[in-house]
């Protein structure tokens, strides 16, 4: 459970982050689950397919980033005073935090944030947007950093047409670039083979040239975006690949080196 206090120390937000069940982020992107759906229909769908509690599924505050993205803010509080008055401010902080995640200010994906408790000042002047929005963002970052965050990378679906004798060369190139073949078929009535593979976008630079040189110019690849996958390894472990990627992205964006410390966002009671 993460706690952050507002700059004037009069308001507290308690929240927790957890990953989505497999497939929910894709459902949101396809439009099966949207912010414009009727609340009860959406709650029933989430309860049936992903085993959410119906009461929680009815209290989804918003989707983010941009009001449509694959992250959810869920209100699981019990009897909090003045909660609806700060809803807009918390939602604004959530949109901000999901658009610029804590690791390297990239969009977040497939995270559910639960608001567990909120302590607010009785006087409305002490709980305006200026107090609540940065607090919401800080607590969301704290949640993210304590929930073992991972980087996600986009993956291409590559379709390669080639004669049978150069298929071996294709496997060699894909193995070097962390790709893997999942389907191989012959085109009926021709000597051509079609090889389908997944290839991380990060590894795809120079892929065509590499492929041509290994197959004597006989293979023709076509790439199209297919899905996101988790980049294996812990971004906070200095020997891992994600740590290196986070470092490169932060350097490119001119951000401070290294993942921000949890103490910047987490407060003590």
Image (tube, rainbow, N blue to C red):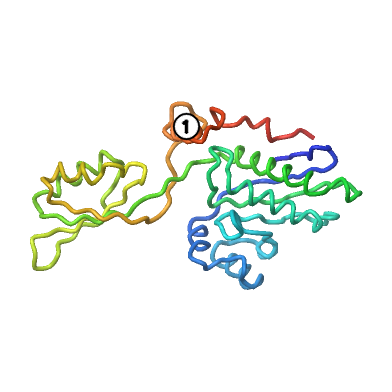
Q: Give the residue at x 73% y 40%.
A: 3
Q: Is 21 or 132 nearer to us in this picture? A: 132
Residue 189: give x, y in percent of width and height.
8, 68
Q: Is residue 173 left or right of residue 69?
A: left
Q: Which sits in the foreground, 130 or 121?
A: 130
Left or right: 219 with respect to 50? left
Where residue 68 appears, x then y in whole percent? 58, 60
Q: How many marks are shown on the rendered structure?
A: 1
State the quadrant of the N terminus: top right
Please give the name of the residue rendered at 91% of the width and 49% of the height, measured from the top-left corner: 122
Could you say which quadrant of the image residue 12 lies in? top right
268 horizontally vs 23: left or right: right
Task: Judge whether residue 234 can be spotted in this image.
Answer: no
* Disc 1: CA contacts within 10 A as few (<14), some (14-19) or many (>=20): many
**Where is the C terminus found, in terms of image quarters?**
top right
* Above or below for 99 versus 63: above
Residue at the image point whose x is 76% and y is 54% from the top: 77
Provide residue 142's location: percent of width, then percent of height.
65, 39
Which x, y percent locates residue 224?
A: 33, 56
In the displayed orientation, state which residue is furthest to the right: 123
SS at mark 1? Answer: helix
Q: Which residue is mark 1?
A: 243
Q: Check the image and report above or below for 84 versus 217.
A: below
Q: Eyeballing the image, is 191 above or below 231?
A: below
- Residue 158 showing in the rendered view: yes
């Amino acid at each position: 459970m993460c706690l952050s206090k507002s700059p004037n120390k009069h308001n507290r937000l308690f929240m927790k982050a957890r990953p989505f069940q497999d497939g929910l982020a894709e459902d949101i992107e396809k439009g099966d689950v949207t912010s414009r759906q009727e609340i009860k229909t959406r709650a029933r769908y989430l309860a049936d397919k992903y085993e959410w509690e119906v009461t929680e599924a009815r209290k989804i505050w918003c989707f983010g980033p941009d009001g449509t993205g694959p992250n959810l803010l869920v209100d699981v509080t019990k009897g909090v005073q003045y909660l609806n008055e700060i809803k807009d401010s918390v939602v604004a902080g959530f949109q901000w935090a999901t658009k610029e995640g804590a690791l390297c200010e990239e969009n977040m994906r497939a995270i559910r944030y639960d608001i567990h408790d909120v302590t607010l000042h009785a006087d409305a002047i002490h709980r305006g947007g200026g107090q609540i929005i940065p607090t919401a963002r800080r607590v969301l970052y704290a949640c993210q950093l304590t929930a073992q965050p991972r980087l996600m990378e986009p993956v291409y679906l590559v379709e390669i047409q080639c004669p049978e004798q150069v298929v071996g060369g294709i496997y060699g190139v894909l193995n070097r670039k962390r790709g893997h073949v999942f389907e191989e078929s012959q085109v009926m009535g021709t000597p051509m083979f079609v090889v389908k593979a997944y290839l991380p976008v990060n590894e795809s630079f120079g892929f065509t040239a590499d492929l041509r040189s290994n197959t004597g110019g006989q293979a023709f690849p076509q790439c199209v975006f297919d899905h996101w996958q988790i980049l294996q390894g812990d971004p906070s472990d200095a020997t891992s690949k994600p740590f290196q990627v986070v470092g490169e992205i932060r350097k490119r964006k001119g951000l401070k080196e290294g993942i921000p410390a949890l103490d910047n966002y987490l407060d003590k009671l």
